[in-house]
Amino acid sequence: MKEQTLQFNASLAEADRQLTVCNACRYCEGFCAVFPAVHSQRAFASGDITQFANLCHNCRGCYYACQYTEPHEFAINLPRALANVRTESWQQFILPSRVAGAFQYHGVAIAGVLVTTIALLFYLLSQWTPGNGEGFYAYLSHTMMVLLFLPAFIVPLVVIAFGIRRYWQTVDGQAVRLTHLRKALADAASLRNLGGGQQQGCNYEEKDRYTNTRRWYHQATMYGFLLCFLSTSSATVMHYGLGLEAPYALLSLPKLLGITGGFLLTVGCAGLAYLKTRADPSLGAGAASHRYDHSTGHNSDHSSEHSSNQAVGPSGNQTDDQTGDRSTRTVVGGEMAFVLLLGATGLTGLLLYVATGTTWVPTLLAIHLGTVLAFFITMPYSKMVHGFFRLAALVRDAQR
Amino acid sequence: MDNNVSSTHWDIVIVGGGNAALCAAIEGASAGQRVLMLESAPRVYRGGNSRHTRNFRCMHTGPLAHLTDDYGEAEYYDDLLRVTAGKTDEALARLAIRYSEDCLPWMQAQGVRFQPSLSGTLSLSRTNAFFLGGGKALVNAYYNRAADLGVEVLYDAEVTDITLDNNRFETLQATVDGQSVTLRGRSIVLASGGFQADLDWLARAWGPAARNFLIRGTPYNRGVVLKNMLDQGAVSVGDPTQCHAVAIDGRAPQFDGGIVTRLDCVPFSVVVNRNGERFYDEGEDVWPKRYAIWGRLVAAQPDQVAYVIIDAKSIDLFMPSLYPPTTADSIAALGAAMGIPLDTLTHTITTFNAGCRDGDFFPTELDGLATEGVHPPKTNWARPIDTPPFYGFSLKPGVTFTYLGLQVDQTARVFGPNGPYDNVWAAGEIMAGSILGQGYLAGFGMTIGTVFGRIAGQQAAASVATFHSNS
C-alpha cells in the first residue's frame, strides 16, 4: 500500500500546484462550486484538495476557458488533476484498496466478474429449479433470490458507508443539518454543477462549445436507476408487507417504475457511453498528469528558463507517452465498462419483460440476474461510488 | 492551406485573431460577405491579448447584465480623462463610450457570457462586465460564432506586406504554415495589435533597459503589419517610445504570464531597489489606482528590478500570489536570500521603522498612517517591518501594450499620406493610441476593440456591398 500512498500524494501535489495558479487568476469563479471553495482559502491542505476533487463534476468548462493550458509552461489541466485526486481518493477510502484499483482501471476486471456471475446464475437455475412458483420464481425460488441478493446488496453498501465516513473525517466535515442536505440534494437532483454556471451545459463532447447533452443522459441514468431501485423496494413492500407476490401486472407499481426506470437507464447509459467516445480522454482521470520519481521522491520538472519557477512549473507531462505502470494507467476502460454494465442491468431487465411467456425467460433471467449481481458486487470499487462521494462533497460544500 | 483560399477574391480580409478581429469578422459575415481571418498564432494560442482579458468597461443606464446602478457617459469620459491626463481624441473616445452600451447585448447574442464581479474586484462591479471564464472563453465563443457564420480562419498565418495602390488595398503577402502566399481581397481590416512582443523594437524605442522587461501577453504581437503600414506612409498616432507597463512578479515568464503574475502587496510593504534603497511612496494610493505607475518606477531602477518586503502582519492582506515569497526569520537573512546588500537594506528598514508612528491601520482605505522624517515618505499603511517571518518578492516591469498606432476616423478608416484609404479599416490595439494617449483604464481596451471591431466590420461590409451592387 505504500506505493499507492506515494502516488496519491503526487496527485495531490500536482493539484495543489495548479490550484495555486487558479487562486491567483479566479476567472473561472462563475462555472461551478469548486472555484468559490478554492478562492475562500489562501493555501490548501490535502483534505481541502480531496474535497475540491470530489466536488468537481468534470464539466471541463475551466479547461477550455484557461489561458494557461499546455503548451503554456503553467500546464494547467484542472479537470484531469482533480479527476486523478478523486479516483485515487476513492481507492484510498474504500477498502481493500487493491481491489478498488483493479476495477477502476480495468474494464476487463468488471467483465470478468460479469461472466462469473452470469455463469453462477446459469448453474443455480439449472441445479435449483424449484418445480413450483410462478413467474421468475418458477425458475429460481424467492428464498434463493433473497439469499443471493440481500448480502450482495448490503455488504457493498456497508463498505461504501465506511469509505464515506473516512472521507468525512478527511475533509473535516461538520455535523450535518437539514439545510445542508436540502441544498446538496437540490444540487444533485438538478446536476447544477454540470450546468456551466448558467445552465448552458458542460464542455464534454463538443469541446469549447457548451451543451447539456451529457447532463440529460446523466439525468436519465440517475433517475432511471432510482426508479429501478424504487421498483424493487415497492415489490419488497408488496411481498412482505401486503402478501402480494410476483408476478405483477403491467399496471402495478413495480412494473410501472421498473419499465420506465429500465428504459431511462438503458438510454442514459448508452448516451453516456457514446459521449465518452467523443470526449477528450486527456481531460479525464487516469493517464499521468504528473511524473513521480520513486528514486528521488521528487516530481521531475520540465526544464525551465526560470529556476525560481519550480513552485509553478509543471511537475509532469500530460501528453508524452510514458512507460511504467502508473503513467500508462487510465480509468477510461474501467469507466466505460461500468457504464455499459449499468446500462446492461436496465436493458436485460427490459428484454426479460418483453420475453415474458417465451422459452427465452430462463436464459434472460440468468443473464439479467447475473448482470445485476455483478453490478452490486463491483459497486464499491467501480465508478458507481462517485455518486456517494459526490453527494458527500456537496453536503460538505453546503457547510462552507 | 486550401488552394481555394488563395484563389478566392475575399470580400473582407481581417488581419489578426483577437477580440477586435473577431468582432469585425462576425459583423462582416453577418452582412453576408465572405470573410477571411488571418491569425498569426497557432490555434492553441489564438486570440492575442484578448485571451488574458477579463472584462469590458461598459456605459449603462440602470442595471445591465451583472452591472449595478448607472455608469453614464460623463463619468466614463471623466475617468478616461483622469488616466490619460487629457491625451485622448474626444470624438473617438465618446464614440467608444456611447456605443459600449449597445455592444454588451450584442456580445451576449454572439454567445459571450458574463458573470458577477470576481472576488477581489468589487470596486469594478458597477463599471466593468466580467466574462464568464475570462477572455479565452470570450474568444472561444466568438470563434464558434464566426465558424457558424462561415468565416474562414487561417492559423499560423502571418501577414508580411500589404500592397497599397492608389490609396487602395488589393493584395497582401502572408506566410501561412511556413509558405509564402498572395491573397486578394476587396477590403481589409487591420486588427493585429501592437508591437510589444518585438523586444528589439521596444529596445530601440525605450532604450536598452527594455530588454529586461517582461511581456504580460501574447508573444505574437510583433507589430509587423503596423510597421509595414507606417513604412508606406500611414498616419500614426500615439507616443512611439512608450509602452504601458505594470509591476509584476519578477519570476514571471518572459511572455504570456497574464493576470496571475500580479502582486498586490506593495501598499503594505517597503519596496527597495537592488541597492537596498527605497525610491517611491508605496502607500500613495490604493493599489488599483497605483499598480500601473509602478511599472515605470521599477523600469527606472538599476537592472529594472525591485524588491517588495513585508512582514508577518501583512501576509494575508492581498490576493494570493502565483509564486511563493522568499521567506526568512530576519531582514538580514531575507536580504542575503534575495541578493540585496545587507548594510543598506538593514539601514533602510531601520530608518523606515523608526519613522513609523502609532495610529489606526485600515488595509482597504486610505488610512493616513504615514511615516515621519523618512524620504521618500510612505503616506498610508506605514507600519514597521518588524514581525518575523519576513517575506520578499521581486518586481519587474510587465509590458501590457504599446501606444503607437494608426490614425483612424469615426468609421475606423485608416489614414494614408493622401487622406483616408478607400478600403482599409483598423480596430483594437493597433489604433487604440488615438483614444488612450497614456495610462490605462481597466476594461477599456476590450471596449475599444469591440466598438471599433464592429464598426470596421460593418463599414468594410457596406463598402463591399456597394461594389457588388455596382458590378
Image (tube, grey):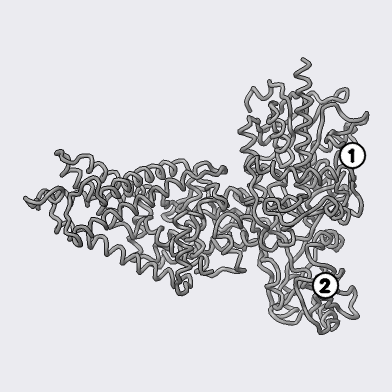
Q: Which residue is mark 1?
A: B236
From the image, which quarter does the C terminus of chain A lie in? Answer: bottom right
Residue B249 seen anywhere in this rendered image of the structure: no
* CB-based contact (under 8 Å), mark 2 and mark 1: no
Q: Give the number of the mark in front: 2 or 1.
A: 1
* Residue type marked 1: Ser
Judge the density around disc 2: few (<14), some (14-19), many (≥20) Cα neighbours within 10 Å: many
When the figure is inspected, residue A5 is found, relative to residue B134, above or below; the finding is below
* Residue type marked 2: Gly
Q: Secondary structure at mark 2?
A: loop
Q: Circle 2 marks a residue in which chain?
A: B
Which residue sits at x=40%, y=42%?
A271
Q: Which residue is mark 2?
A: B276
Quarter of image, res B368: bottom right
- Return the x and y of residue A34 as percentages of the image width and height: 54, 60
Q: Of label 2 and label 1, which has the lower sequence position? A: 1
When the figure is inspected, residue B292 is found, relative to residue A210, above or below; the finding is below
- Return the x and y of residue A46 as percentages of the image width and height: 51, 68
Which residue sits at x=37%, y=45%?
A269
Q: Which residue occupies the extreme top position in the image?
A: B471
Q: CA distance from mark 2 to mark 1?
A: 41 Å
Q: Secondary structure at mark 1?
A: strand
Judge the density around disc 1: few (<14), some (14-19), many (≥20) Cα neighbours within 10 Å: many
Q: Circle 1 marks a residue in which chain?
A: B
- Return the x and y of residue A16 as percentages of the image width and height: 56, 63
**Residues beneath discs 2 and 1 located on the same chain:** yes
Q: Which residue occupies the extreme right position in the image?
A: B418
* Tally of numbered discs: 2
Q: Nearer the viewer, residue B459 or B391?
A: B459
Q: Which residue occupies the extreme left position in the image?
A: A131
